Amino acid sequence: MRVYSPLLALLLLGASSPCARGPLSAGTYGFVGGGGPPPSESVSVSGNVMTVQQALGDRMFTTITAAYDAKTQALAYLKREANCCGSYWFSSVTRNADGTYDIEAQMTSGQGVYKESRSHFNGGTALINAGDFFIVPWMYHVTHIAQIVELSFSPIRTDLIRPEETAAAPFPEGVPSHDGALLLRGVDNKPMGTLWYDPCTFTLDAYKLGAGTVWVRTADL
């Protein structure tokens, strides 16, 4: 019987060999799989600000750029852009001085302009995410947060996601057997995806959302 303990796995790894790098160090990470354009993630750290950029597709069809407080993982701002097929989408999330967020979404097409906004959204103790799950393992283990607010745009929607540790066997091909895994539960506590990650650096190694295909991280780009 396999007993899963990410803390034990981390201690064993540390005893056998030190981590090669600090958690979520600067770099670019690519993923391969199927069912859509290949995503990539870029991480940069400057002072106490960690910036994560996600790109979907070789032609930069969609980009999400988000800045977080490197210690608390609180979202400072987020910008999402998409350009395809005669339409352009722009969304943004900005943190206010009181800890609430202003959310804006806009789509421009040949049929006109759609705009929507929400002011002073309060996520409570939950951290904010918007479609980029690369940072979730690091976010979860740094803060031990019980809930994450998942933002969707066009229309603006906020849903609570609850990450929980899981054995998640069998592991996808190419993912180390000592990896940690998080099961994501969404509306009505239903499973919505699984994240596999390096328990030493908390870098995402693979993920599967819904009934989609598994995306596995390739060598760092």
Image: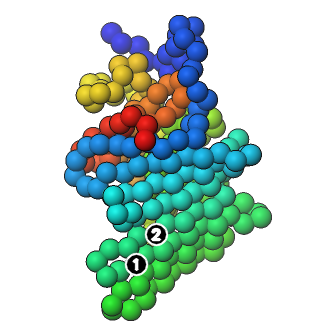
Q: Quadrant of residue 218?
A: top left
Q: What distance separates the C-alpha of mark 2 from that of mark 1?
A: 8 Å
Query: Residue 123: x and y, percent?
Result: 61, 58
At mark 1, the secondary structure is strand
- What numbered label is drawn on residue 81? 2
**What amino acid is found at the position of numbered circle 1 in the picture?**
Tyr
Among numbered discs 2 and 1, the one appearing first in the sequence? 2
Pick out the residue farthest to the right.
97
Up-down relation of residue 196 to residue 101 (above or below): above
Residue 81 in percent (x, y) is at 46, 69
Q: Is residue 177 above or below residue 17?
A: below
- Residue type at mark 2? Glu
Residue drawn where x is 58% and y is 15% of the image? 18
Quarter occupied by residue 82: bottom left
Quadrant in which the N terminus appears: top left
| Tag count | 2
The structure residue drawn at horizontal position 46% and vertical position 48%, both measured from the top left corner, is 41
Whether residue 67 is visible: yes
Q: Residue pushed farthest front?
A: 221
Observer-nearest of 216 and 93? 216
* Image quadrant where residue 66 sits: bottom right
Q: What residue is disc 1 on?
A: 88
The residue positioned 73% from the left and 46% from the top of the image is 48
- Residue that protrudes farthest toward the top in the picture: 16
Q: Does residue 127 appear left or right of residue 166 in this picture?
A: right
What sort of colour scheme is used for the picture? rainbow
Q: Is residue 133 above or below residue 219?
A: below
Q: Are marks 2 and 1 in contact (CB under 8 Å)?
A: yes
Horizontal side, residue 38 vs residue 42: left or right: left
Q: Nearer the viewer, residue 146 or 14?
A: 14
Above or below 72: residue 159: below
